[in-house]
Image (spheres, rainbow, N blue to C red):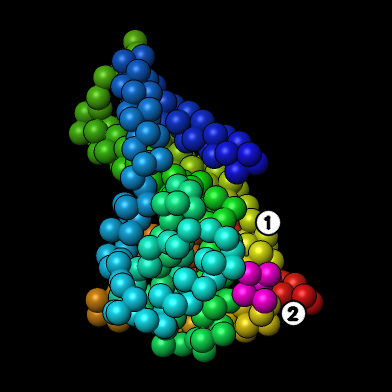
Amino acid sequence: MNNMFKTTILLASLTGLLVMVGRAVGGPSGMIIAFVFAVVMNFGSYWYSDKIVLKMYKAKEVTESEQPNLYRVVYNLAARANIPMPKVYIVENSMANAFATGRDPKHAAVAATTGILDLLTNEELEGVLAHELAHVKNRDTLISAVAATIAGVITMVAMMARWAAIFGGIGGRDNNGSSNIVGFILLAVLAPIAATIIQLAISRSREFAADAEGARISQKPWALANALGKLENGASNYRPRKGDVEASQNTAHMFIVNPLKSGVIGSLFRTHPPTEERMRRLNAM
């Protein structure tokens, strides 16, 4: 129930942002169009956002015969967590990382990069996948997938509106001829506002909760702590290779460690708790 409440708040906030964009750019008619568009996207993101995210990262579903060890680990952990067996995906990326998606445990998917399979021991991999299954069990994956999809829509609409303003604007001009300027200013700040809302909605406490639940599922908190250390170090020193899919800011919160490097400003809007603190809590278990 708590996660459903958070999801409702997130959808309402992002819908409000889309309506604001429509009002600023197209006046009352633009507001109505934006609202209708938001309703359609909210419906679509609930049902299809997991497929969109998996396609975004070119994730490939694998069978037990193709990835026996990975499949077996997920199967055993799902049984311990008392949830249905999720679909298993591989992402061709040298960065060691993993994420889960799906609107509920019956429609869940777990994705691991090729990099994480090369880097971690079997126990550490267990810890990471247990963390991801904890997100599935707690239904965190729904809000994460919805956030990723709608944030992308807001960015797209804002970009289109900016180009429209540059080339003469679209509708909604008031008697002073200033609505496009106001709309442009609003759009210039809407994207970071949307990102902030998403990052706040996907709170750090959820990661701590998933770490704790994942440790209980795997029964090896030290293994997850060791894995987090390796993954954080790998992300900090990551150098993209040919064929790697570039991570998106809108989906960074879905991964077990942030796949994007953040400077001083970026650290103010962390999508994850500090890895050192996560490791400390896990080792204390």
Q: Mark 1 points at which residue?
A: 205
Q: Where is residue 112 in the image (x, y as percent from the top left)?
A: 41, 72
Q: Residue furthest left?
A: 167
Front tag of 1 and 2: 2
Q: Of the two numbered discs 1 and 2 on the same chain, state the one appearing first in sequence.
A: 1
Q: Which residue lies furthest to the right in this view?
A: 284
- Number of residues whose C-alpha sits closer than 10 Å to that of mark 1, classed few (under 14), some (14–19) or many (20 or more): few
Q: In this view, does 245 lie to the left or right of 97?
A: left
Q: Which residue lies furthest to the top in this view?
A: 175
Examine the structure image and report whether residue 130 is included in the region drawn in magenta.
no
Q: Position of residue 250 (x, y in %)?
A: 43, 53
Residue 174, compared with residue 147, is above or below; it is: above
Q: What residue type is labelled 2?
A: Asn
Range drawn in magenta: 215-219
- Quadrant position of the C terminus in the picture: bottom right
- Number of residues whose C-alpha sits closer than 10 Å to that of mark 2, classed few (under 14), some (14–19) or many (20 or more): some
Q: Is residue 57 left or right of residue 199?
A: left
